[in-house]
Image: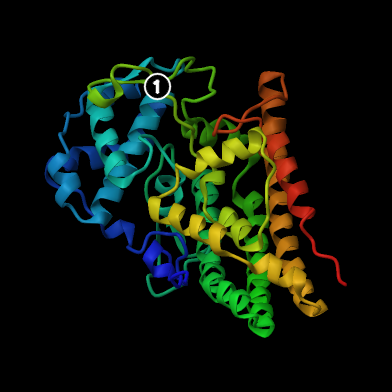
Amino acid sequence: MTPSLDIADHAISRQRGFLCAYDMADVSLSGDLAPIAEAAHDLPRLLPTGRIRSHLEQLPLLELTSFCADAPEHQIRTAFVRYAFLVQAYVWGEEVAPASLPASLAVPIWALARRLEQKPLLTYSAYVLDNWDRLDRSGPIALGNLYMVQHFLGGQDEAWFVMVHVAIEARAGAMLAEIPTLMEAAAQGDAGAAERGLTMISAGWDDINRIFDRMPERCDPYIYFHRVRPYIHGWQDNPALGGGLIYEGVAEAGGVPQLFRGQTGAQSSIVPAMDALLGIQHAQDPLRSFLDELHAYRPPLHRAFIDRVRKASGLRDFVAASERPDLREAYNRCVAGLGRFRTRHLEYAANYIHRQAKDALGNSSAVGTGGTPFMAYLRKHREETQRHFLKNV
């Protein structure tokens, strides 16, 4: 018998979804880590000098074995956020990318990443999930009451880009909370409970798509491409870094250039969790391989949640076997909501990256921050989603 699924076991809540459970602005890094926190806080002041590396090379080399073993989770994750921003600033903060990362940054980020079972650079979890707070702690996790804690250059466009993602993650919490109920309903043959759960998820997609529609309000495509996006690239499939980045002083890396994917919204766990629940399959091709690779960039408990849902969800088969048109319609509305989200993502990719790259670089074959030909991938994603509608019998 399959054990019951509890979202709390996977660091998920109805109120916050995959977002961190603590308030980041209250997490302080003191003692030896104080200069690190200060340097990260000063990035909006230091990056415009064009000499960021000379500043960051003065940071002390910290050996974080004891910290990673003994510090509470929220401090370790906050330290990872600070170091991840410093690493990205060092690599992309000057005109020519370096061949190596100094030990003062490489050794600590590697240790923190190993402790968290993450990759040693800026991930979506560090950029979005653990990098926000509320202006009014008694208010909702929603646009209008959110701010970005750690910045690169700062400014409205950078903050809005992240805060839209935070608001989406928060709204998804109630949807994720329905997944165990829906899986149980399918297992027990309870069509009424399945329809109710699917209706709630469909309403969630309506809200998420409304939030996503607001991206252009305060994040301009030109500013995003030239002032926000440059700092969140990775080192894999990136011609600016050629064969990758050497992590100096990291014995485990062996002096070999490392290749890691950059921060991308495709590292969010919402869509793959919903794919898993709804039984949406992607063909075995380079896109599927890329998605499988990105799975390793998610926090381990979130990865395990997706894996469990993918393995145990019998929802699609249950709905397909049902003769109730209202149940099929509820399922199809969820697929449609997910499809609308992917369509909007494709539109934003075209406007915020594809067109900007063509104007700035004279070519339209730009790759995403994850290092992939995103236009073809996103288009294929959308088409595969749309093929999963169930016909009424």
Say which of 72 and 53 sits in front: 72
Name the residue type under label 1.
Answer: Gly
Say which of 151 and 234 sits in front: 234
Image coordinates for residue 249, horizontal then vertical, percent:
22, 22
User: Which quadrant holds residue 35?
Assistant: top left
The outermost residue toward the front is: 1
Q: Is residue 206 above or below residue 188?
A: above
User: In the rendered view, does 321 fall on the left or right side of 76?
Assistant: right
Say which of 45 and 338 sits in front: 338
Label tally? 1
The outermost residue toward the right is: 393
Answer whether residue 73 is visible to the viewer in this image.
yes
Q: Is residue 337 above or below residue 177?
A: above
Image coordinates for residue 89, horizontal then vertical, percent:
38, 30
Quadrant assignment for the C terminus: bottom right
Q: Could you classify mark 1 by the number of other residues whose Cα lies within 10 Å: few (under 14), some (14-19), or many (20 or more)?
A: few
Answer whether residue 131 is visible to the viewer in this image.
no
Residue under label 1, please give it: 50
User: In the rendered view, does 11 fall on the left or right side of 157?
Assistant: left
Image coordinates for residue 278, horizontal then vertical, percent:
66, 62
Identify the element where label 1 is drawn: loop
Image coordinates for residue 95, horizontal then vertical, percent:
46, 17
Q: Is residue 381 above or below residue 233?
A: below
User: Which quadrant holds residue 122?
Assistant: top left
* Colouring of the image: rainbow
Question: Residue at (79%, 61%) from the top-left corner?
Answer: 389
User: In the rendered view, does 230 fall on the left or right side of 126?
Assistant: right
